[in-house]
Image (spheres, coloured by chain):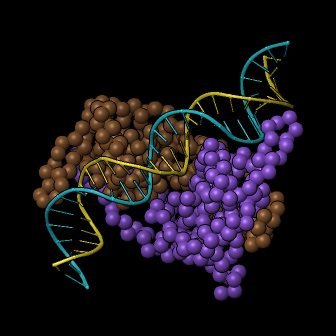
Chain colours: A brown, B purple, C cyan, D yellow
Amino acid sequence: MLLDYVILGVLAVRRLSGYDISRWMDGSGRYIGYGVKSPQIYRKLTALVDRGWVAFEVDPREGRPDAKLYSLTEAGRQALLEWARSPYEPSPRPMDPDFKLRFLFAGQLGPEIALAVVDTELAYRIKHDGTSADFPITDVYEGQIPELDPDWAREVHIMAHENGYAYAHSYIAWLQLTKARLERLLGR
Amino acid sequence: MLLDYVILGVLAVRRLSGYDISRWMDGSGRYIGYGVKSPQIYRKLTALVDRGWVAFEVDPREGRPDAKLYSLTEAGRQALLEWARSPYEPSPRPMDPDFKLRFLFAGQLGPEIALAVVDTELAYRIKHDGTSADFPITDVYEGQIPELDPDWAREVHIMAHENGYAYAHSYIAWLQLTKARLERLLGR
DNA sequence: GCCCCATAAGTTCCTACGTACATAAGGGCG
DNA sequence: CGCCCTTATGTACGTAGGAACTTATGGGGC
C-alpha cells in the first residue's frame, strides 16, 4: 500500500496531525500526482496506530477541537527503512505517482537510496520508451456516429499523444540529470 | 464517471471488444495517465448495456472464445455529445488524466470542442500555477528518525518538486501551442 | 511427447477510496 | 443577525477498481 509509506515518509520529517497531512497533499504534494482525501488519511492513520507503526499524542488547541499529533514508533521507523531498501518496481504508466513517491519518501533517507531508485526508473523508461504493444483505435474507422470526422479524430489522437511523448522525454531528461547529480554527489 | 465516457469515446471511433479496449489502455492509452484493468472494463460495459448506451453482438472466433463487439446506441451517442458539450472543470492536480481524456474523447468530435477544453484548462493552469496553499513539511524538522538528515531531505523535496514544476511549465507550453494551432485551424 | 507461455475473453472476490454528512468553535462579511 | 469559511476530526455509505482465478486454444522450447 502506497499510502502507508507516504504517511510514514512525511511523519519521518516531523510530527503532523491528520489535517496537516491532508493540507500537504493538496499543497506541494499536488505536484506528485498523488492525493487521497482526508477520510482515507484518518482511516489509514488509525490503522497504522493499530499496527503499531505510528503513535499520537493529543495536542490541545485553544477554542478549536484538539488535534492529534502523529509520530513514528520504532516499528514504524523499521518499516519505512525496510520499504526504502526493498527493490523498486516501476509502473508501466510513466505518469503514475509510484516513482515520485518512492523518490521522495525513500530518497529522503539518503543519496544512495535516491540514486538506486532513479537508476531503476531510468533503465525501465529507456527500455519501454515507444516499445508499446500499440493498439491504435483510429486506424480502422467504422463510422459509429456521424458527428465524428475520422481525419479530425486521428489529428486529435496525435496531438494528445504528442503531449504524452513530450512528457515522457522531458521526464527521461530529468532522470538523467538527477542521476548525474547524485553520482557526482556520491563521488562516483 | 470518467470511464463511462472513455468507453463511449473509443466506441465512437469503431466497434471494439472489451479485450480491445483493455489493450488500448495498456498501449497508446498508457500515455494518457489513465488506465483501468480489464475487470472494470467488462463491468462498465455490462453496466452501459443495462443503461442502454451501448449494445453488442457476438462475434464468433475460430477455435478461441467468442468475442462481444460493442457499439454505441443512439442513446449512447446522445450521452457522449452531451458530455462533450458540457462545461469542463479542470482538476487541481495537473497530472490528473481529466484533461487528456476530455481533450481526446470530447475533442475528437470537433475542433470547436477541442479548443474550448484547451482554453479552459490553460486559463486554470495559468491562474493556479504556483499559487498553492503550500504546506512545506521540510521547513520544520523535528528529528523523528536518526537516518533522516534534514538538509538532504530538503534537497530531495526540492528535486522532486523541480520535476513537477518542469512538467507544469512544459504542459502550459503545449496548451498554448495547441490553442494557437486550433485557433488558426478555425480561422480565428 | 510434455510443459509452459501467450493470446483471448471473462468472472469472483475483496478493499481502498470518494461523497456527503456531523460536530464544534471562532472569525469575517454583508 | 445570520451565513458561510476555516480549523480539526471524524462517521456512514456506496462504488470504482485491482489481484487472482477460469476457460480455451495455438505455438515454442526441451
Residue C29 in percent (x, y) is at 24, 81
Residue B72 in percent (x, y) is at 73, 61
In the picture, measured across the screen, residue A72 lies left or right of residue C2, that is: left
Observer-nearest of A90 and A119: A90
Above/below status of B110 relative to A187:
below
Residue A3 visible in rendering: yes
Observer-nearest of B140 and B42: B42
Residue B103 in percent (x, y) is at 62, 67
Q: Which residue sits at x=82%, y=62%?
A: A142
In the picture, measured across the screen, residue B71 lies left or right of residue B2, that is: right
Residue A187 visible in rendering: no
Observer-nearest of B11 and A35: B11
Total marks placed: 0
Q: Quadrant of the N terminus of chain A?
A: top left
Q: Which residue sits at x=80%, y=41%?
A: B66
Q: Picture quarter containing residue A51?
A: top left
- Taking the view exactly as shown, the residue that stands out farthest to the bottom is B188
Q: Which residue sits at x=44%, y=74%?
A: B127
Q: Picture quarter containing residue B109?
A: bottom right
In the picture, measured across the screen, residue A148 lies left or right of residue B106, that is: right
Q: Which residue sits at x=16%, y=48%?
A: A59
Above/below status of A117 relative to B163:
above
Above/below status of B21 relative to D29:
below
Residue A126 in percent (x, y) is at 63, 46
